[in-house]
Amino acid sequence: MLLERRGQPPAQGSWAIPGGLVELGETAEDAVRREVLEECGIEIAVGPILGLFQPIERDADSRIRYHFTIIDFLAHYRSGALRAGDDAADVRWVSPADLPHYALNPATREMIERALERLKVEG
């Protein structure tokens, strides 16, 4: 699995699946390809949608600080050398057996489990 340590808020310093914002006029698939190239230095083939979640972070007064709609895709490595770029503090390939060593949020863990199940089905 490809994991990224976030270099910017929100969630700065935490490990997650690479991704970012969709630019105006860009498809979600194109955004995934662009963000992974910018943050990780590699090209990917974007596969099917694995799921969607919407983290909402509030401040001490319950005002919304961040509200994201996150669409996770299954993707496969195509080419390039893995390197941290753009707003990633670190990037690395992680075997499924090593995932417990990373403090991932529950939604990220769920998406990774979905990806692993999908890969088992695809054989």
Image (cartoon, rainbow, N blue to C red):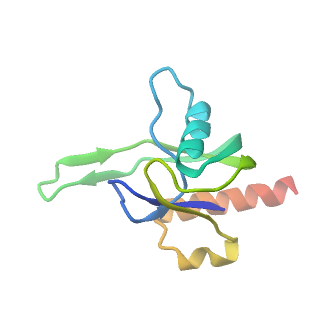
Residue occupying image coordinates x 42% and y 65%? 14
Q: Please, which residue is most extreme toward the top here?
A: 25
Residue occupying image coordinates x 22% and y 47%? 64
* Image location of residue 22, percent across then percent down: 47, 33
Q: Is residue 9 left or right of residue 26?
A: left
Q: Please, which residue is most extreme toward the left here?
A: 61
Q: Is residue 114 left or right of residue 90?
A: right
| Figure disc tally | 0
Query: Which residue is nearer to you in this view: 81 or 22?
Result: 81
* Image location of residue 27, percent across then percent down: 57, 27
Quadrant (top left/top right/bottom left/bottom right) for the N terminus: bottom right
Residue occupying image coordinates x 39% and y 65%? 13
Residue occupying image coordinates x 81% and y 61%? 120
* Image location of residue 29, percent across then percent down: 62, 34
Q: Is residue 88 left or right of residue 8?
A: right
Q: Quadrant of residue 44?
A: top right
Q: Is residue 35 above or below residue 60?
A: above
* Image location of residue 66, percent across then percent down: 29, 47
Quadrant (top left/top right/bottom left/bottom right) for the C terminus: bottom right
Q: Quadrant of residue 24?
A: top left
Query: Which residue is nearer to you in this view: 75 or 120?
Result: 75
Q: Is residue 53 left or right of residue 27?
A: left
